[in-house]
Image: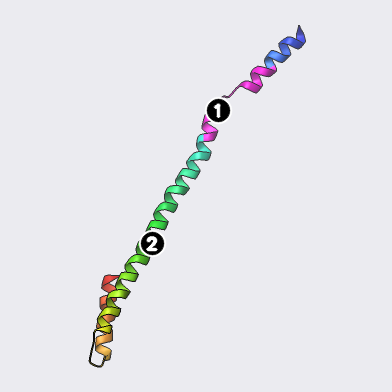
Amino acid sequence: MIIRSFKKRLAAKLGAEDGTVSVEAVKVYQLLIWAITATFVFFDAFKTLHLSQKATYAVADMLSRESVAIDDDYLTAMHEVFAHLA
């Protein structure tokens, strides 16, 4: 009789799931916040890479089409164009 009641109480304690949802939520929220932050960081990195490549292609195309000698003023203007595009 005593052993049966002990087994019932032990089974009730081991089977109790009070508070497990909040513990799991804390673990999942950390992973969710990390994933959202990583998504924004990766998106911004690829956006920056894409914009700088497009600006480089535009400046290179402008330089390749020149038929006269390129002076310092023209290079300064190209730098400003690149800075504006990128």
Q: Residue furthest top?
A: 1
Q: Toward the viewer: 29 or 58?
A: 58
Residue at the image position 56 percent from the left and 24 percent from the top? 18
Q: Is residue 67 magenta?
A: no
Residue 86, compared with residue 29, is above or below; it is below
Which quadrant holds the N terminus? Answer: top right
Q: Toward the viewer: 3 or 46?
A: 46
Contact between labelled residues 1 and 2, with CB atoms less than 8 Å apart? no
> Which segment is the magenta one?
10-24
Q: Quadrant of residue 56?
A: bottom left
Crowding at dot 2, Cα within 10 Å, few <14 / some 14-19 / many 20+, comes out as few
Q: Is residue 83 left or right of residue 17?
A: left
Query: How far across and how far down the image is residue 78, in percent?
Result: 27, 81
| Amino acid beneath label 2 | Phe
Query: How far across and how far down the image is residue 7, in percent?
Result: 72, 15
Residue 46, numbered label: 2
Query: How far across and how far down the image is residue 2, in percent?
Result: 76, 9
Q: According to the image, label 1 marks what residue?
A: 19
Of tags 2 and 1, the one toward the viewer is 2
Q: Is residue 27 left or right of residue 67?
A: right
Dominant SS of magenta comes to helix
Q: Is residue 18 magenta?
A: yes
